[in-house]
Amino acid sequence: MKTLGLLSLLPAIFLGISPSSAAGLRYVVKSSPVTAVGEPTVMSFDAEGLLKCKKLEVEFAAPVGEPLDLTGVPKYKECEILGSAATVVVKKGEYEFGTPEVVLGKIVAPLSIIGTGAQIKITVEIAGEQCEITMESQAVPGDAITYTENLAKTGGQFVVDAKGVKYKSNNKCAGVASKEGEGGTTEARLTETGITV
């Protein structure tokens, strides 16, 4: 039994996490606010046309300390779909990076879009039509975030690999998005220097 107990702690030890904190991890915010920056970012909506943004910034307004989760407003910049300029507007919404935990030797966390009336709207002109795609408040299935600590700096990298994102469109998005679906994806790598786990 003692051997099994030691083995259960090995993933946390290899990650540099103390055994006492492995069962209940928290984010450690060194300064506030913290802006995580990623480039590029890609989204898909059950079709061939991909939304590609050269930069994604998420500003976390968490207080200095050890919060269980992080919330921040995403800002998408320099975006396009099928070669046409696209805009991404966030209304009353934030991304929530949920409580981290160790799974199979990795630090992972859930991802949600939160906020009453929250809406992330993507607009682009497709074949002369104004295509609109919206994502509303929802919890993305599974653990969509993996965190890697940068031991050389105060901070690390959030790798977002979200699948099963719900969305709707105005049905003017041929080749980009269907009327509605639950197969949206988001991929991004966000680097920051004020948060550890």
Image (cartoon, rainbow, N blue to C red):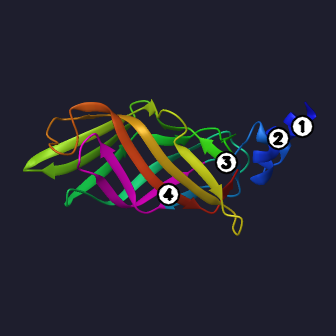
Q: Using the image, tell me which numbered label, if any, was put on residue 3.
A: 1
Counting residues from the N terminus, which is met first, the one under dot 3 or under dot 2? 2
Q: Give the residue type at disc 4.
A: Arg
Q: Give the residue type at disc 3.
A: Pro
For the record, the magenta segment spans 38-61
Residue 153 in percent (x, y) is at: 69, 67
The answer to whether the residues at label 1 and label 2 have Cβ atoms under 8 Å apart is yes
Frontmost residue, 2 versus 146: 2
Frontmost residue, 92 versus 69: 69
- Front disc: 3 or 2: 2
According to the image, label 4 marks what residue?
189
- Front disc: 1 or 4: 1
According to the image, label 2 marks what residue?
7
The answer to whether the residues at label 3 and label 2 have Cβ atoms under 8 Å apart is no
Counting residues from the N terminus, which is met first, the one under dot 1 or under dot 4? 1
Q: Residue furthest right?
A: 2
Counting residues from the N terminus, which is met first, the one under dot 4 or under dot 2? 2
Which residue is rendered at x = 24% and y = 43% of the image? Answer: 47
**Label 3 – label 2 distance at C-alpha:** 35 Å
